[in-house]
Structures are given as C-alpha cells and as structure tokens.
Amino acid sequence: MKRIFWSLALLASLGVGLPSHASLFDDDEARRAILDLRQRLEVQKGGLEATQAEIRALAQENAQLRISILDLQSLIEKLQQETSRLTGSKEDLARQLSQTQMQIKDQAQAIQARLNKFEPQKVSLEGVDFMAEPAEIREYENALGVFKKADYAAAVQVFSDFNRHYPSSGYTPAVLYGLGTAQYATRDFKGAMLTFKALSTTTPNYPKVPESELLIASCLIELKDNKGARKSLEDLIKSYPQSEAAQMARERLSKLK
C-alpha cells in the first residue's frame, strides 16, 4: 500500500487527475497509472538525453569552431607579417635598384668623360666641319692664344709644331694662315710667302686665301720686288674679283710704281 501511495502522490505532482473518491482506485488501476507514468517518464528521459547529447555535440562543435577561428586568426597574422616583410623587402629592392641605376649612370658618365678626352670631336671652323682629336684641339687653341697675344715669334714656333704633329688636320688652313701672318710680322718675308703659297695651293677655297695672296704681294714689296708684287696683285684681282682683298689690291696697284 505504501508503494501505491507514493505513486498516487507522483501522479498528483504531474497533474494527473485523481478520482474524487479514493475508493474508486483498486490495485489494477494503480498499476496502469504507474505504468503510464513510467512510460511518460521514459519518453521525457529519452528526450532529455537526446537534448543533452545534442548540447554536448554543439558544445564540441563550438569548441572545434573556436579552435578553427584561432588557427585562422593565427594564419592571418602570419600572412600579415609575411606581407609586411615582403612589402619591406620590395621597398628595399626598389631602393637598391634605384641606387644601382644611379651608380651605373654616374659610372657611365665618368667613363664617357674619360673617353671624350681621347675620342675625336666634331669641330666647325670657317664654315667647314671636321673631326679632331682632343689633344689636337687643345694644341690649336694654345697656338691661337699665343698668336692673339701678339707674341709672333712664339706663334711661329707653336704653329710650326702643330703642322708637324698633325699634317692632315682640319685645322691646317687656319694654321698656315696664322703661321704666314706671324712670319710676316717677324719680317720673315720669304718664309711667309712659302707658307701662303702652300695655303692657296692646298686649300684654294679657304675664305682667307685672298688675304694671304694680298700678303704675298706685301712680302714682295718689302723685298723690293715690285714687278712680282704687281703680278701677284693682278692674279688676286683675277682669281677673287669680288673679295675685299681684291679691292685693296686695286688700290695698291694704282699706287705701285
């Protein structure tokens, strides 16, 4: 009877309605009620266990997801660090490349500057273009500088040296004219005539040939060869009639006895 009492109490707690009169219950009804209660409890227990299993599964899945998220965050950090390192390396490489390019450019310019000291350069003189070696250019400019200082004796020497060093130079016509003029200034009239004749023979189209022909006549006058001077002046007028030197030759002819 004690067992039946506790079963009835449990039914009451679960909301199972009880007859208003206890006398209505007998042992069979009590057993059926208890069995029904047990079944319901089993069902609820099974549902609870399923829920607990699902909760455990979700908890495990959540734990794995957290681990995966942590691994992913760690991977992202590593990728960010690697990206930063690669970016820094890229910037370093770009800077090194720029520095190397500048060094190569500077070296190339330095090499070219050294080569320019030896390679021929284009020169334009009296309307004529030609190639000349750097040393050749320097020697001519030095000789011209001496001539412009009116140191004619020294000019004769430096122009003569130039002709000996560069016999086929594009400067030769200018050097011959400078040499003949310096010789005339030092009263070396015979030497001046030979130089001027060499000029007119080798480069008859040189712009200063008419002037050199006029100076040949002047040398002949200084040497008291008026006949030779007259012929020289006449040849000048005939060869270069439109030149200023020809005009001066006409004036000299009118005064030459």
Image (cartoon, grey):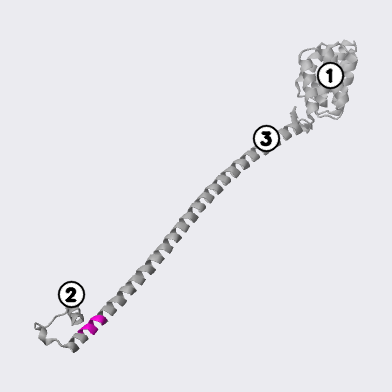
Q: Amino acid at mark 2?
A: Ser
Left or right: 22 with respect to 68? left
Magenta segment: 33-38
Q: Is residue 25 magenta?
A: no
Left or right: 247 with respect to 197? left
Q: Residue placed at 64% from the left, 37% from the top? A: 102
| Among numbered discs 2 and 3, the one appearing first in the sequence | 2
Q: CA distance from mark 2 to mark 3?
A: 101 Å
Residue farthest toward the front in the current orientation of the protein: 1
Q: Are marks 2 and 3 in contact (CB under 8 Å)?
A: no
x, y percent for residue 108: 70, 37
Does dot 2 land on a helix, a strand or a loop?
Answer: helix
| Among numbered discs 1 and 2, the one appearing first in the sequence | 2
Q: Amino acid at mark 3?
A: Asp
Q: Quadrant of residue 240?
A: top right
Left or right: 36 with respect to 73? left
Q: Nearer the viewer, mark 1 or mark 3?
A: 3
Residue 246 appears in view:
no
Q: Amino acid at mark 1?
A: Val
